Structures are given as C-alpha cells and as structure tokens.
Amino acid sequence: MVASLELRTSKDLKRIAAELRAMGDKQLKAEFSKELRSAAKPMVPAVRRAIRQIPSKRGYRADGLRGAMSRAVKLEVRMAGRDAGVRIRVDGRKMPDKARAVQSYMEGLKKPWRHPVYGNREVWVSQPAHPYFFRTVRPLGLASRVQVNKAMDRVARKIS
C-alpha cells in the first residue's frame, strides 16, 4: 500500500476563508480557526524551549533577552485578506525597545551584531548567531501541515 499526502497551499486556505466569509457561518469559521490553532499549537512551546537553550555564559534568565524572546513567541491564525494563514513568530514589538530585531540576529537572518560587554563601551564583542527557530519548527511542520490539511478538507466538504 502506497501512502500519499497532498499538501495544500496557502491559496487553498485563502479560498476557504473567503468562502466562509461569504457564507456568513460564524460557527463553522470559529471551528475552522480553532482546528488551525490546535494544529500549530505544539510549535509554540517547542520554539520557547529552543530559545531558552541558546547558550549563554550567564545561563538562562527570565528577565534577560532570551526571556523576552521566549515571551514574544506567538501563534497567529488569520482568516482574512492576503495574510490568511497560520503563523508562529517571535514578535519584535513585544521585545524591549533597543532589542526589537534580536530574534533575527540570533536566527542568523541578519549579520552578527556588536555590543558592549556589560555596558562597557571600551570593550565590544561580536555576537554570533544561534539558529533556533527553523531548526525547531521544520520537524514539527509536516505533522502540523497534515492536521491543517485535514481541517481544510473537513471544512471544504461542509461548504460544498
């Protein structure tokens, strides 16, 4: 027996979301949104755990940058417009003012940043990247995507 898996695209999700809006069935829309959220929910604690495990000479501190990054991890389910979809992100708006892009630097999406050692402006160091996000989310992504596809199939059947 050969197993097959059809991975649906974000266009399918946008189309289903548009159909649900046109139908005006708020209960079905809420049910679909809840299923999407539950499919991606296991990724949030996994990303937070990966952030807490980023190496540091001082160890993990809840009031430090890694603690702020961990608190900034959020799950978004949007059912409207171009941005219809499910996202896990580290929201820079929830980071301290001067550290809004730290998550991108840590992941290695931006060049390593330089900073003074414990505020001493005479001594600067370059902070290397410690990828945490994609390394954590990729293995969980397929199982989550399968759940999302099943939810999309169920709702598509109810619509038609």
Image: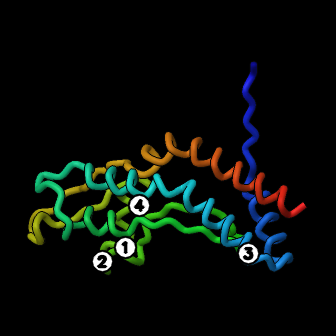
The quarter in which the C terminus is drawn is bottom right
Task: Give, as a three-letter code, the residue at label 4.
Answer: Ser
Question: How far across and how far down the image is residue 55, in percent?
Answer: 21, 48
Q: Which residue is mark 1?
A: 100
Q: Is residue 91 visible?
A: yes
Left or right of 37 on screen, residue 116: left
Q: Residue at x 26, y 54 (%)?
A: 52
The Cα–Cα distance between marks 3 and 1, rounded to whole angstroms, is: 26 Å
Q: Residues within 10 Å of mark 1 (few under 14, many from 20)?
A: some
Task: Quote the CA–CA distance across marks 2 and 1.
Answer: 6 Å
Q: Quadrant of the N terminus?
A: top right
**Mark closest to the chain's N terminus, 2 or 4:** 2
Asked whether disc 2 touches disc 1, contact meaning CB atoms under 8 Å apart, the reply is yes
| Residue hosting label 2 | 96
The residue where tag 3 is placed is 81
For the residues marked 2 and 4, what is the alpha-carbon distance in whole angstroms? 14 Å
At mark 4, the secondary structure is: helix
State the mark number for residue 104: 4
Q: Give the foreground label among 2 and 4.
A: 2
Element marked by disc 3: loop
